[in-house]
Amino acid sequence: MGLDGGLYLPYSATTIRHIQSVMKIRGLYAGPLNGVLDAPTMVSLYTFQEATDSLQRCGVPTPNTRNLLEQGSHTDIAGIGTGG
């Protein structure tokens, strides 16, 4: 269940590990690359979603969230001003 209370289909460990890796490289995530959609991963995703203003704030890697994470430096720590 996402932080917004919505239910989402499970994401594979490979997908979550990739998302964690991208967020870590950008300075948005400080947790382990464990492939688990755990609280630290969800909080980092929520913070990213909140800072971008165009994403649903749910704490899960929705397709739109994954697409924006892949787009570039405007979504890194300098661009959104979060500490991960």
Image (cartoon, rainbow, N blue to C red):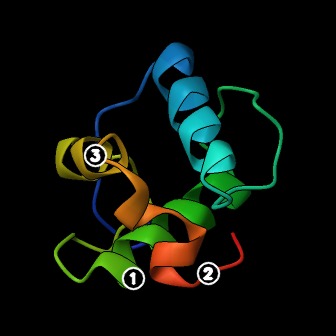
User: What amino acid type is highlighted by mark number 2?
Assistant: Thr
> Which residue was labeled with disc 3?
71
Image coordinates of residue 47 in percent, x first then y, are 51, 76
CB-based contact (under 8 Å), mark 2 and mark 1: yes
Precedes in sequence: disc 2 or disc 3:
3
Alpha-carbon distance for marks 2 and 3?
18 Å
Closer-to-camera residue (63/11): 63
Q: Amino acid at mark 1?
A: Ala
Q: Quick one: label 2 or label 1, which is nearer the N terminus? A: 1
Whole-percent x and y of residue 53? Answer: 23, 83
Residue pictured at 58% horizontal, 48% vertical:
23
Q: Which label number is shown at residue 82?
A: 2
Viewer-side label of 2, 3: 3
User: In percent of the image, x 35 and y 70: which residue is there?
Assistant: 5
Q: Which residue is mark 1?
A: 51
**In the image, is 80 to the left or to the right of 38?**
left
Q: Give the quarter of the image for residue 52.
A: bottom left
Dot 2 crowding, Cα within 10 Å, few <14, some 14–19, many 20+: some
Answer yes or no: do the residues labelled 2 and 3 have beta carbons within 8 Å? no
x then y, percent, for residue 20: 61, 39
